[in-house]
Amino acid sequence: MSTWQLLLLFLSAFLGGLSVFLFKGHSHKMLKLVLSFSGAYLFGITILHLIPDAYHGNDDLVGVFILVGFIFQIVLEQFSDGIEHGHIHRHNQEHSSFPVGIMISLCLHAFLEGMPIAEGHQHELVFGIALHHIPAAFALGSVLLAHGQSRNRTVVFILLFAVMAPAGYFFSTQLSNGGIGNLQQYFNRIMGVVIGIFLHISTTILFESSADHKFNLRKMIAVLCGIGIALAGFLL
């Protein structure tokens, strides 16, 4: 994996989080379109690349671990309040305690998302994850500020979130090379968990309804573009 790809993975999350200091209120409609595009793109990459690769080793239990990953993401969202989808929830300003559950679950989510990059398809996944992390980091910054965190502390925690996906990549690289014990033999099952997470995140974004329970035209175009680019990359 080249240096510029790691930088893109890091900077997308870091700068996306810092943008919370520039955009106020609900003036972030463009971020929602980016989220729709990246969700569709991740869905396409998961179906076209990750799932076939996971079953390449003829492990019949991979499907079980995909289900485990899907359910695991549901559990994570009980602590993250759906920030993975770019959701920003208003919290009671009287409670200024640090959102520990949100921070831990979101960092774990980003760490796991970085793992598939070690198995190839780097360009597709790097772009998809990078785009996906922009609104997620923006939502994280918003929640941290709403919980009374200072500007400096908010920057530090956004920085921590930004390094999680590259850290997941490095861990997965060591794992796939057999550098971490003998866990390499279970790599496809671990990837099954990651696939389940991707499926949950991407389908939630894709089928999440608008205020009138319908896709608006701009969101539909963003979704079709995301799937179209993933398909074009696969065919070409």
Image (cartoon, rainbow, N blue to C red):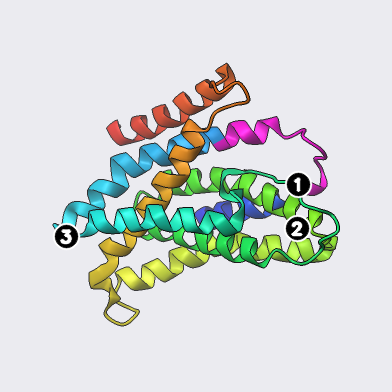
Quick one: label 2, few (<14), some, or many (20+) residues within 10 Å?
many
**Within 10 Å of the Cα at label 3, are there few (<14), some (14-19), or many (20+) other Cα atoms?**
few
Q: Amino acid at mark 2?
A: Leu
Query: Is there a contact, CB below 8 Å, between mark 1 and mark 3?
Result: no
Contact, CB < 8 Å: mark 3 with mark 2? no
In the displayed structure, 66 sits above or below 209; it is below
Question: Where in the figure is residue 224, as x and y percent of width and height?
Answer: 45, 24
Q: Is residue 90 left or right of residue 107?
A: right
Residue that numbered label 1 is attached to: 90
**Is 60 placed left or right of 5 in the picture?**
left
| Distance of label 1 from label 2 (alpha carbons) | 11 Å
**Which residues are the magenta region?**
18-35
Sequence order check: which comes first, mark 3 or mark 2? Answer: 3
The residue nearer to you, when weighing 135 against 76, is 76
Task: Identify the secondary structure beneath mark 3.
Answer: loop
Say which element carries label 1. loop
Camera sees residue 24: yes
Could you tell me residue 200's position as x and y percent? 43, 46
Dot 1 crowding, Cα within 10 Å, few <14, some 14–19, many 20+: few
How many numbered marks does the figure carry?
3
Residue 23 vs residue 208, the one in the foreground: 208
Which residue sits at x=16%, y=59%? 57
Magenta stretch, main secondary structure, is helix
Q: Say which amino acid is labelled 1.
A: Arg
Say which label, 1 or 3, has the lower sequence index.
3
Pointer 2 residue = 144
Seen at 30% across and 44% down, the residue is: 49
Whole-angstrom CA distance, mark 1 to mark 3, is: 44 Å
The residue pinned by badge 3 equals: 59
Q: Nearer the viewer, residue 37 or 74?
A: 74
Q: Quadrant of the N terminus?
A: bottom left
